Image (cartoon, helix red, strand yellow):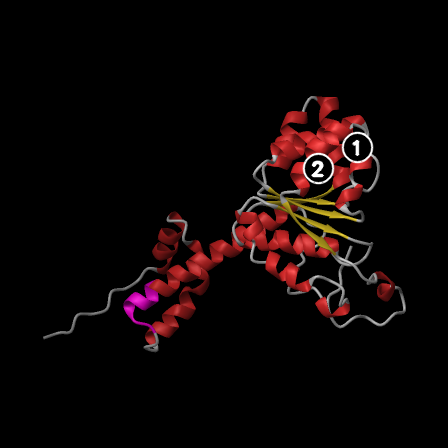
Amino acid sequence: MTPTSAPIIDNNALTASLRALKLGGMLQTLDARLAQARAGELGHLEFLQVLCHDEISRRETTSIARRTRRARFEETLTLEGFDFTANPKLPAAQIRDLAALRWLQAGESVILYGPVGVGKTHVAQALAHLAIRAGAEARFIKTSRALAELAGGHADGTWTRRLRELARPAVLVLDDFAMRELTPAQADDLYELINERSGRSLILTSNRSPVDWYPLFPNPVVAESLLDRLINNSHQLLMNGASYRPRKRPGRAVPTASTTTS
């Protein structure tokens, strides 16, 4: 009896089929997985399972990269790259607790406040990046820039669209919050933004303590309505200690760990 010959695989047809099924990513690891199968390292079902896992991993990586671009971070920073040992006054345990993202699941906010240069912006972007890795959309923007965008919307009739764009992400990072006194129009826009984002998380960084934000609003009623709700639904971390920035002056020794800060 003549043994049944192995079927001949048309690589071009296989490639076309995988791409038609939007599984073209499998082609990136197909040769390596076939080599494992021929070596007896993978059975038939294992081969298929591993190829599917490769495709899922590729899609997750692509999706994370896409959401990261949409977030418009100043830099792609992580908690793994933050030097907790450089400043013993930092609330390291609280920051690591926030990395579990329970605040995101609960729709709560995070307020990081303290002096200049201690790492508030790094931690804010790192927490937002963790949210992205967990599947959420995020956006990073300076508070002054957000207010300028909304002000521009009043001028050209796109205010509602701009407000919705800032309200849409699950996490909105407002960097350098409460830097200066607000105009009545800015206070109203900020009120509308916070109100529109009800149930979605904010991450605020500020050089001022939240109790010092109230006088920055020209209307005490607006301040009380906005800040009372925001502050009482947030995790507040005082980030204190010396600034890292003097160590980055020209001619200084380069730190051994990442110390990008704000």
Q: Is residue 142 left or right of residue 137?
A: right
Label 2 CA crowd tier, 10 Å (few <14, some 14–19, many 20+): some
Residue appearing at x 69%, y 31% in the figure: 225
Query: SS for tag 2?
Result: helix
Q: Nearer the viewer, residue 127 or 150?
A: 127
Between 215 and 173, the one nearer to me in the picture = 215
Is 256 on the left or on the right of 247, as rendered?
left
Q: Is residue 55 above or below residue 184?
A: below
User: The C terminus is located in which quarter?
Assistant: bottom right
* Magenta-colored span: 42-48
Q: Is residue 193 above or below residue 51?
A: above
Indicate whether 37 appears above or below 54.
Answer: below
Q: Which mark is residue 227?
A: 2
Disc 1 or 2, which lies upstream in sequence? Answer: 1
Q: What residue is disc 1 on?
A: 217
Q: In which quadrant of the rendered image does the N terminus lie?
A: bottom left
Query: What's the residue type where badge 2 is placed?
Result: Leu
- In three-dimensional space, the C-alpha distance between marks 1 and 2, rounded to whole angstroms, equals 10 Å
